[in-house]
Image (cartoon, grey):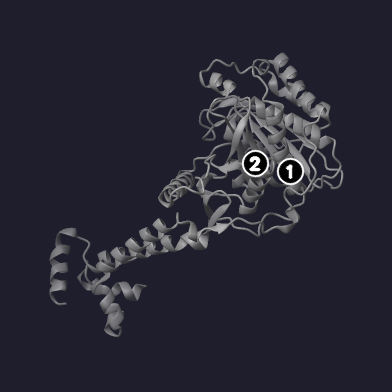
Amino acid sequence: MSLVLSGQSEKTSALLRAGRRHSALLCYPLAAASIAWLLLLPLSSLWNRAYFSENAMMPGQVGLAFGAQSHLDAMARVDAALTRAGDAWADALADVLGGIGLETEVQRVVCDEVPGIGGRSGANVHGILRAARSDSVEALVVAAAWATAENATNVNAVRLLAGLAQYASEQVHWAKDIIFVVTDGGEPGIEAWLRAYHGLPSAAPLLVRSGVIQAALSLELPPAKAYARMGLFMEGKAGQLPNLDFVNIVQHISRVERLPALIHGVEDPPRRAAAWRRYLHSARLLLRQMRSQAFGASVGVHAPFLRYRIDALTVAGIARENDPIAAVARQGLLRDAPADMPLPSPAAVRAVGRTVESTLRSLNNLLEHFHQSFFFYILPANLRYLSIGDYIPAAGLMVASLLFQAMHLWWMQGPDRLRADDPRTRIERINAYHALL
């Protein structure tokens, strides 16, 4: 590279001499080719159909049991305990999980976006269900924040988490521990819990802990009577993504339960829609994902898990347009007290609960960390993907364009013997150099 920039190799290479003369013109076709490549990505002919690389997962292949009366009773006990406790919700929830048979602990933390600067006090509650067929070497996490990403109450997810804990305690086929976590601090709260779980110096270690966390699933269920569909959010900070197999598993299972989990909650256009409408829909979805990855915008509390190389994503319920409870909640007429928050319909609870149940059963079959599928991808539609090999050429062409432009600007300054530190004399010497070409 030093020979190329200094111009010494041009004495023996006609190609370098031609590249030096036309470097300013080469950058524009490369940039145009990069943009054209990006414009081709929303075309369905370039997409790949989603599949499972990890054959041991077997999603949707087991009989499901969630929805029994004991599970609904556990959800009701959470309501009663939280109503009596008031602000001491953490201890009350820990008592409910402990009554189910989980090993519980309450962590008092200071939730701050920037460590050491501001923040507020909060609490994290976690309960661990020990697997009967293992020695606590691996674990799965089901997490729920006290509020959704839109700052609505997430008490429905906390209720469901207690029902799932009751269900899991009745089963004997678990090969991994299951950790149920509830935080009132959002992403900073989960980050504080993960620091303490892994014993980092900045946090006091937890007394009740398990083994290596293989995967995490975050739940967001805003107030609603029923959910039309679920939104699937997987973007983390700095463009981090979970393994594509995890995303495909949740999407497949949710469709089996007839409550589809859609990418960002966006439905695909009808098959009979015009080609230009399908193209625009896919382009908007791709831009939305790229924006989320570029700026680190995430929905749910799954993002901190990705920093610790734990595959995680958020499943968020999306209410029907004419849902009466959702309409009242949007008007701000519902209080956050669990007793004043109506339960979703039994069918909605069963559909969401069985989706999480079947996902846990599939993750329970995981023999090792997710590794066979892609970690770099974009999703132009539901159950379709574009791998890194499909979109990285556009980035390569754009980088090449910028490289040629930078080399052209360097060459315009002339050779080393004419290059000066004083900008006032540089123009005259550049003109003198180019006059000799």
Image quarter where the C terminus lies is bottom left
The amino acid beneath tag 1 is: Ser
Residue with the mark numbered 2: 201
Q: According to the image, label 1 marks what residue?
A: 358
User: Residue 32 placed where, x, y %?
Assistant: 32, 61
Residue 130, placed above or below residue 433: above
Q: Is residue 309 visible?
A: no
The residue depicted at 60 percent of the width and 29 percent of the height is: 185
Q: Number of marks in the image? A: 2
Residue at position x 63%, y 45% from top?
A: 312
Between 305 and 316, the one nearer to me in the picture = 316
Element class at badge 1: helix
Q: Quadrant of the N terminus?
A: bottom left
Q: Which element carries disc 2, helix, strand or loop?
A: loop
Q: Residues within 10 Å of mark 2 (few under 14, many from 20)?
A: few
Residue at the limit of the structure toward the bottom, as seen here = 12
Nearer to us in this view, 320 or 330: 320
Q: Residues within 10 Å of mark 1 (few under 14, many from 20)?
A: many
Percent position of residue 125, x then y: 70, 30
Where is 432 relative to 354, above or below? Answer: below
Structural distance between the alpha carbons of marks 2 and 1 = 36 Å
